[in-house]
Amino acid sequence: MAIKLDMLKAYDRIEWNFLHEVLKGKGFDTRVCALIMECVRTVSYSVPINGVPQKKFEPQRGLRQGDPLSPFLFLLCHDVLSKLILRQQIRGQIHGISISRTAPAISHLMFANDTILFARANGRMATNILECIHKYESWSGQQCSLVKSSVLFSENVVSAHKNDILNILNVKECDGQEKHLGNPFVFKRKKREEYLYFKDKVLKRIEGWKSKLLSFAGRTTLVKSVALSIPLYAMSTNKLPVSSCREIDRVIRKYWWTGNTKKDRFLALVGWDRLCSPMATGGLGFPEAKGYELSFVGQTGLAVCF
């Protein structure tokens, strides 16, 4: 089974005493710990009411959003959960999954505040994982969101075992609609349908620009900086279907020519291939979705080879 964990207000709930102990445990010098904690503690907030800032107040826990130091401090704290799971794995209390007989067992994957735990689908494993989570919550102040967390079972797990595990963890079963790092958590047979949400995201972003009555230059800037950046991470980790790439290009092309995605017919004075050519050759340098994907595939190939 795979357990997708979602922490509730991850940055806002970190206890400062816990952060201080983590820094000391990682071997940071006393003066460095003092400087870091001074940066964390010397913060105040003011809530504007009717446009008027009110009296400032000081928080007692949490990390500031947008602070360049906060992501690194959060990762140090979140590593404690990783250590708890690894300790249970060494003791044989948690068994991860292996992609082959000779591959090492993987018990968890973490990226920022997104966590996926892997274990055998039985009640004992679920109880051991829950103990690690509760211990981490009591130390750090973090709280697992039971509403957003879910469990994915393999097809061989019987319904009785599924119900026992769900009752122990008190979370729902994965319905296949969840996303992890912007990608579908579960891929189905019809891969094209899994990536339709990219088209919807581009449409929603573009529809907000219609009322701005932007010129061609403004549309060009927004398309290059915002619209084409939406599917980039998915392209760097998965191979999108050609039809999905064409749908993204079609939406962007229609918006650039008309400023409106509702029009079915419009006059394109220049071919899209010409507009996607470099500016040195007379184009506007629009990157095609398929070209983006091929560049990421090549980059991944080089990383594997070297």
Image (tube, helix red, strand yellow):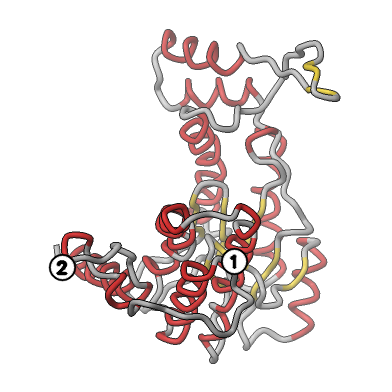
x and y, in percent, of residue 46 in the image: 74, 18
Residue 25 at x, y percent in the picture: 47, 25
At a point 67% along the width and 74% down the height, the residue shown is: 177
* Callout 2: SS: helix
Q: Which residue is found at the position 69% from the left and 63% from the top? A: 126
Circle 1 residue? 201
Residue that label 2 marks? 305
- Pick the front one: 172 or 256: 256
Q: Nearer the viewer, residue 155 or 194?
A: 194
Determine the image quadrant of residue 164.
bottom right
Residue density around tag 1, few if under 14, some if 14–19, many if 20 or more, within 10 Å: some
Mark 2 burial class by Cα count in 10 Å: few <14, some 14-19, many 20+: few
Q: Nearer the viewer, residue 10 or 274?
A: 274
On the picture, is 46 further left or further right than 103? right
Does residue 287 lie above or below 240 as drawn? Answer: above
The tag on residue 215 is none
Residue drawn at point x = 72 percent, y = 36 percent = 138
Splitting the image into 4 quarters, where does residue 102 fall?
A: bottom left
Residue 58 placement, left or right of 182:
right
